[in-house]
Image (spheres, rainbow, N blue to C red):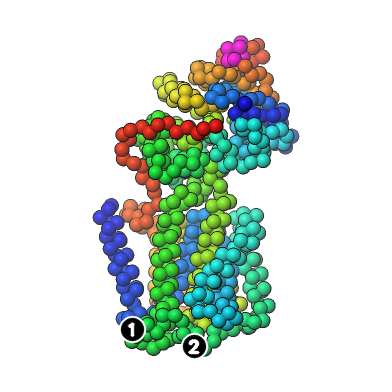
Amino acid sequence: MAILSLQSVSKSFGALKVTDDVSFDLNAGEALGIIGPNGAGKSTLFNLITGNIQPDRGRVLIDGQDVTRLPPMDRVRAGIGRSFQIPQPFGHLSVYENLLVAARFGGEIPASEAPGFCMDILSRTGLATVAEKPSGGLPLLQRKRLELARAMATRPRVILLDEIAGGLTDAECVELVATIRSIHAEGTAIIWIEHVLHALNSVVERLMVLNFGRMLMIGQPDQVMASPEVREIYLGIEA
Amino acid sequence: MTLNRNLGLCLAFLALTALYALPAIAPRAMVQDLFGILTLLVLAMNWNLLAGFAGLVSVGQQAFVGIGAYAMFAAIILAGLDPLVGVLIGGIAAALFAVPMAFFAFRLNGAYFAIGTWVVADIARLAISQWKALGGGTGTSLPKGTAKEMAFVDQIKELLDVSSAAAADALTYWLMLSLAVGVLIASYVFLRSRMGLGLQAIRDNENAARSVGVDPVKLKALVFLLTAFGTGLCGALAFIQITRVTPDAAFSVIDWTAFVIFITVIGGIGTLPGPIVGVAVFYLLQRLLADYGTIYLIVLGCLGIAVMLFARRGLWGLFIDRTGIDLLPLTHRPPRMVASRPAAHRRSA
Ligand SMILES: Nc1ncnc2c1ncn2[C@@H]1O[C@H](COP(=O)(O)OP(=O)(O)OP(=O)(O)O)[C@@H](O)[C@H]1O
Ligand SMILES: [Mg+2]
């Protein structure tokens, strides 16, 4: 059974149709990439999956259970962890405390195990040295890492990553891909929105293309990338 | 840092010992004076939890003071219970009242929440004014000698070798002091707990907090109920000493909420020692300016405004920024060792 399903999900902001009849299934442990031009509705799709936004139509299911009416916190506990495209740290809390909140609430990790658990994630994401720093003062790149780390701390079965590779150097990008692969190797399913295609395609097994809120294609990355329609949309970016 | 902390703890311990010893050494008027100050401190610590940590800026805390006081009077006059039992009933009554109040007020946000709580408090005042058995709009007094017949008063009378009235004052004073210490310790433990961590996350970013599994409404409702209980206890205890209750006095927004907001803001909203600093400043100003009446209120107002403009986290926040000393820090420090990696935590499907 699919771990996550969207069934004919639609959402409009006023006259603007941002998500247009999107349906797909994600299997347990699968890695799915999402690409599409700016404003295509990628982040909105994440918000619909996590419950930060309610759809106008359609259903969201986790493990076959309808969660369309459930608030975000229930979906986290059901196993959906997310990062935000624009980092949203708990600014007055330290980096470590940001993870502690996620581990204790979303991850339901007992108090005795939480410190070791959080430190483990911090070292995996390269944040151990700034563990005690207030997260509000971090530079953008480290804020993005914190988004990844905090999502991991909720112990997700599906982790949603929204453009976390932008602006990285080649070496940093290689490191990030290795981290995401290790998450994947542990059996966590991944949905990754990314403009950095070579990083994305080195991880995902399937690729989805969104355009004007519609799912244009979904399939194997090389087939999707070979499609003329996709090449046309991506001409500006890939040229 | 640890030296400073130990020094701070020693000072706090000495101050506390002196405060507990006060009825044995100080004149009765001073005990009564400090009782009033401690009352404001307890209210301020509760309001600080509510507004400073849970983001619930209530202007209706007088509802809980009033209901606590009236429940206590009812327990004594109508049910013939000991005043100390009445105080407990006052706290419980306030917490019970907080349930329907939350249902109404939690539908509102920000300024609307503030006004909503005020309106509910005033409705409670009007409703209580209809309670004929407790004097209706003109209120009622405790039966003569109630305070002197409280449990423990005889023992205290012997211990301190004072009049019954002074012994009753000492008892209520000790109870209020203990309530203050209890609320402080409970707040600290609560804020350092998982729930306190969640509250701090909500304060920083509610949307992100929900996305890591924190339920803002649940946590805020819990704080609302707990502080209603603390405020109700405090109100009931305060009115044992006042011995007379009227709807206007028990539900006074000025006495039980406005001053309390000033104290918290001046001392440092969102910091645990803030209300203590605030109440000390308040007390000093009151003594210095006691003869000037209105001037006193004007100075207080100006000070409050100045702090809001120039030191958002109050005098205590200023002190932390200048010295780096934080006596009751809420931070969770990461463990030093990163020795053995625990086995990967996975959730089973
Ligand atoms: N809360 C909102 N209210 C109104 N319009 C919104 C809201 N959120 C998003 N939009 C609009 O919906 C459209 C899709 O936004 P979305 O953030 O999902 O795009 P995206 O594919 O993630 O883009 P990007 O690549 O720039 O991140 C945009 O035109 C955006 O302005
Ligand atoms: Mg986006």
- Vertical arrangement, residue B19 with respect to residue A103, above or below: below
Q: Tell me which amino acid carries mark 2.
A: Gly
Q: Main secondary structure of the magenta part?
A: helix
Residues B194 and A43: in front is: B194
Q: Position of residue B17 (x, y in %)?
A: 31, 71
| Label 1 secondary element | helix
Q: Is residue A233 left or right of residue B61?
A: right
The residue lying at 52 percent from left, 62 percent from top is: B227
| Label 2 secondary element | loop
Residue A134 on the magenta span: no
Q: Is residue B104 visible?
A: yes
Q: Which residue is mark 2?
A: B145
- Vertical arrangement, residue B61 with respect to residue B326, above or below: below
Q: Which quadrant would the C terminus of chain B be assigned to in this image?
A: top right
When asked about the image quadrant of residue A48, the answer is top right
When asked about the image quadrant of residue A51, the answer is top right
- Vertical arrangement, residue A237 with respect to residue A93, above or below: above
Q: Position of residue B152 (x, y in %)?
A: 41, 80
The residue lying at 66 percent from left, 18 percent from top is: A217
The residue lying at 56 percent from left, 77 percent from top is: B75
Distance CA(mark 1)–CA(mark 2): 19 Å
Q: Is residue B279 visible?
A: no
- Vertical arrangement, residue B25 with respect to residue B338, above or below: below
Q: Which residue is mark 1?
A: B160
Query: Subunit of mark 1?
Result: B
Residues B268 and B143: in front is: B143
Q: Tell me which amino acid carries mark 1.
A: Leu
Q: Position of residue B236 (x, y in %)?
A: 52, 74
Q: What stretch of residues is rendered in magenta?
A: A220-226
Q: Position of residue A199 (x, y in %)?
A: 49, 19
